Amino acid sequence: MKLFETRTRIDRLEKLIKVCAWTRKIKVEDEWLTIEEFMKKYLDKDVTHGISPEAFEKMFKETKVSYDSKQK
């Protein structure tokens, strides 16, 4: 039973992807890749960029405040 539990734990750990909390790069072996590089190299997917509703709202508010303060 102990061998099975150990193997199960190893299987779970192998499924984890280490992501840098600051740069959001992904560690693969000894290399840190951008998300775009990782997607292309390992999943054969190209990445395009957009803006989430939350980011749009935040940017709009910050831009509006900046614009409003310049108008005074």
Image (spheres, helix red, strand yellow):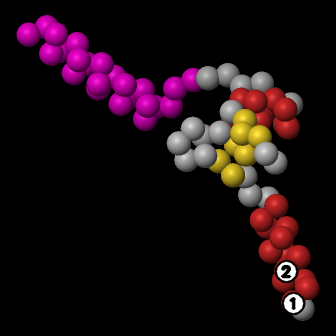
Toward which corner of the image does residue 44 lie, by quadrant? top right
Mark identifier at residue 6? 2
Tag 1 residue = 2
Quarter of the figure with residue 54: top left
Q: Give the residue displayed 37% in from the left and 25% down from the top.
A: 59
Image spot of residue 41 (x, y percent): 84, 32
- Residues 21 and 46: in front is 21
Q: Which residues are magenta?
A: 50-72
Above or below residue 28? Residue 38 is: above
- Labels 1 and 2 touching (C-beta < 8 A): yes
How far is mark 1 from mark 2, CA to CA? 6 Å
Give the side of residue 36 with respect to residue 45, left or right: left
61, 2: nearer the viewer = 2
Magenta residue check for 38: no
* Residue kind at label 1, given as amino acid type: Lys
Q: Position of residue 2 (x, y in %)?
A: 87, 90
Q: Position of residue 42 (x, y in %)?
A: 85, 37
Q: Residue furthest bottom?
A: 1
Three-letter code for the amino acid on which mark 2 is drawn: Thr
Name the spot of residue 24 as percent of width and height, x first: 60, 40
Q: Quadrant of the C terminus?
A: top left
Q: Of helix, strand and loop, which one carries label 1?
A: helix
Residue displayed at 84% across by 83% down? 5
